[in-house]
Image: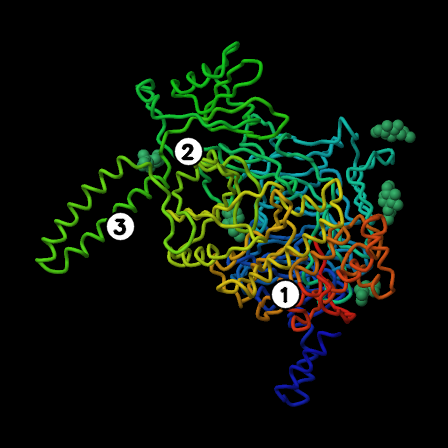
Amino acid sequence: MQGLQIQYLHIMDFQLPYCFFFLLLLLLPFSGNGQAHSNISSGLFLTAASDNLPWTSPSGEFAFGFQQVGDAGYLLAIWFNKIPERTIVWSANRNDLVQGGSRVQLTRDGELVLNDQSGRTIWSPVFGGSGAAYAAMLDTGNFVLASQADANLWQSFDEPTDTLLPSQNLNSGAQLIAPYLEKNYSEGRYKFILQADGNLILYTTHYPLTTSNFAYWSTQSSIGSGYQVIFNQSGFMYLVARNGTVLNPVFSNSVSMQDLYLRATLDYDGVLRQYVYPKTASSSRSRAMAWTTLSNSIPSNICLRITGQQGGGACGFNSYCRLADDQRPSCKCLPGYTFFDPNDERKGCKKDFISQDCDHPSQEIDSFEIKEMPNTNWPFNDYEMFGSVDEDWCRQACLSDCYCAVAIFNTAGQCWMKRVPLSNGVTDPSVGGKALIKVRKGNSTAGSSAKKCDRSNLITTGSVLLGSSIFLIVLSLLGIYVFFSRWNRQQQKMIPQHRLMPDMNMQNFTYNELERATGGFTEELGRGAFGTVYKGVLANEDKPLIAVKKLDQMAGEGDREFNTEVKVIGRTNHKNLVQLIGFCNEGQHRLLVYEYMSNGSLANFLFGDSRPNWYRRMQIAFDIARGLLYLHEECSSQIIHCDIKPQNILLDKSFNARISDFGIAKLLKTDQTKTTTAIRGTKGYVAPEWFKNLPVTTKVDTYSLGILLLELVCCRKNFDIDKKEGQIVLADWAWDCLKEGKLDLLVEDDEEAAEDMKTVERFVIVAIWCLQEDPSLRPEMKKVVLMLEGAVQVSIPPHPSSFISTI
Ligand SMILES: *[C@@H]1O[C@H](CO)[C@@H](O)[C@H](O)[C@H]1NC(C)=O
Ligand SMILES: *[C@@H]1O[C@H](CO)[C@@H](O)[C@H](O)[C@H]1NC(C)=O
Ligand SMILES: *[C@@H]1O[C@H](CO)[C@@H](O)[C@H](O)[C@H]1NC(C)=O
Ligand SMILES: *[C@@H]1O[C@H](CO)[C@@H](O)[C@H](O)[C@H]1NC(C)=O
Ligand SMILES: CC(=O)N[C@H]1CO[C@H](CO)[C@@H](O)[C@@H]1O
């Protein structure tokens, strides 16, 4: 009805004659164009267009209609309609997107038909009996076609794509097929099927076919077999045997559907996960939330589970899989190999160097070297095994054999020789042994392009000099001669020193130097929005440890901009910032070199096993605020961090907190004031204005600091699904406690903090000031520091009106 009212007002705007308007109103239901319908009667249709309104369920929580997928076209889908992500739970044409102007209609014959613009039928569900009298989008997320007598003729729940919703069951023979990529809904490489024999199985497929390849998880031997998988309203998923016995659950998370949206999805990486998303009354509150994974995913480590004779494994060929800190599988190429497509890591990697000459392998031994990777293996692909040998023998054997791509040497003194393409690669402590990977020396694209680059610079300098005048030519030639002969001599004596940037204490590294310093980028310290960080050591006398951040590749970035921004970062110097000591800008490689922080991130410190003491946590809060004050007001050009969170706060050897990753947002040349869909901050710590197209100011950092302060006081994450009702979102709970004068509840089992309630209270009040939805109400960082130190009087803050929870 709401839809009709809107239509009404709209038409009144145009001041159409009353009777004409009435006529239109009568025609509307038949001329399609989606409005909020509960029952969709025959004749209605939806058109694929960016402004199309879907058919929604009575509560508005689910919608059926067209979703645009990038520039590729439209998906006829069902999605969660009350959350900003519009997460898709079902689709009709995942392998065959339609273009704008296509339409889906419940025909007068009672058939549901998706036609493309030319009228060709793309999809139409098949069901028995006569046509449907009406269709309905239900509040469960099920789209049904029903007869006049209300009998279900067809339902989307019976033909799932990659997701199951609570109350949706998987019947014998039904399956989920993973999407190809996170945002590419085409059928991908994994499936989850309840076979006719009752076994519930996760399979890899023979992509691009959907036939079963390797079973990497199944219930038959552990749980048993059944004829139906039930996914009930509290989030339990279990098999029911033919005789009605309920078997042990597959998922046993108990979830309150009142507060949370829930789904079980077979993700593109082959892992079946349960996700929850907080339902909230106010729409502004739900804006910055995200889907959280519930703890047990299936299988727990897919890297170790896939060991098929055919196919690349959990990652593609010539790569290896490792469970990252976030418990998700991460795919990497082995040294000397690069991704076919960096956006599609499971497509595998290709060799990036010229293979060994098989006619004369021994002549080429010196051109190859071995890179080591501990605890790594490619279980199949062996073509030879030598027992009772030592590691050196194994290395030589691989170097002198042109078939050998990798040799695995294990503690039993065995040397397994393997050839490409390597499959089922995995790195895990349980693997043991080490992989010896053969790569051609010095054949990296980076190395060669760097040399070219240096030379061409010299040539340009030369020609400018020559262009001036004949007299100058003679002079310059003489000069150049003298310069070069001296320079050459000096070069021979001197071990090349790092080139210092003229106006700051920063080094310009070559890619090869950093590759060497990090042992070929092997030891990963962390992974952020902009790239991966590796541990390394410089070859200087005192062998300082470094952290090298390899920025993700960007298309068409100007060298000058990169250098300018690096200079801005390089000029910063404060004891609460991680110091940038150098960079590399060579070909497509952009790297930043920082001092190494030996005590890891605040996230690990704060949310780890043992709680850091209250005094240390207070000091950390002061440190972070002072670091931000410096970035905002005291350094030569203002820097807004945009991504303050515990993962970006590092602890040096004396446990001083140091802010890292500042200035990078700018460096990637995204306009600071423009909100795009690619929000840089991390969900939960992100200020509400990000989502509202308002300019981004230093107050976004103030907001994130507010969340961090509460986490420091309470030693827990802002969003914690395991907490009691009312305590799940820390920011909400802290406000409630403050309002009711019960702040002691926040630090209940923390004696030290409980004895210092004055400070706890001050910190919470400052935090709530920082979390004000209106940025202008949030204090400047200078004020925050003074407030935290207790140097200024702090008044009781108003209700922040919007809390954003951490995920
Ligand atoms: C949809 O139509 C059916 C059958 O006509 C009716 O029983 C049901 O109440 C209708 N639902 C709504 C929400 O109008
Ligand atoms: C999804 O990936 C498949 C396989 O690579 C490709 O054919 C298809 O075009 C992709 N779809 C979109 C929307 O990018
Ligand atoms: C879901 O199943 C579990 C386990 O059988 C049971 O304890 C729970 O009560 C069920 N919830 C609902 C809403 O049926
Ligand atoms: C039902 O079947 C299961 C296994 O399929 C079996 O373990 C159980 O004993 C059966 N229960 C009854 C009551 O027959
Ligand atoms: C410097 C060098 O030899 N580069 C080569 C490395 O390998 C690739 C791929 O085989 C060649 O194209 C490069 O020329």
Q: Is tag 1's residue or tag 2's residue first in the polypeptide sequence?
A: 2
Q: Residue at x 59, y 40 (%)?
A: 598
* Image-quadrant location for residue 622: bottom right
Q: Is tag 3's residue or tag 1's residue first in the polypeptide sequence?
A: 3
Viewer-proximal residue among 670 and 182: 670
Amino acid found under the numbered disc labelled 3: Asn
The residue indicated by pointer 2 is: 351
Q: Position of residue 417 (x, y in %)?
A: 48, 19
Q: CA distance from mark 3 to mark 2?
A: 31 Å
Q: Residues within 10 Å of mark 2 (few under 14, many from 20)?
A: some
Q: Quadrant of ligand 5?
A: top left
The residue indicated by pointer 1 is: 781
The residue indicated by pointer 3 is: 457
Amino acid found under the numbered disc labelled 2: Lys
* Image-quadrant location for residue 725: bottom right
> Which mark lies nearer to you, 3 or 2?
3
Viewer-proximal residue among 3 and 456: 456
Q: Residues within 10 Å of mark 3 (few under 14, many from 20)?
A: few
Count of numbered labels shown in the rendering: 3
Q: Say which mark, if any, is on residue 194.
A: none
Viewer-proximal residue among 283 and 197: 283
Vertically, is 728 above or below 45? above
Q: Residue at x 73, y 53 (%)?
A: 711
Residue furthest top as drawn: 388
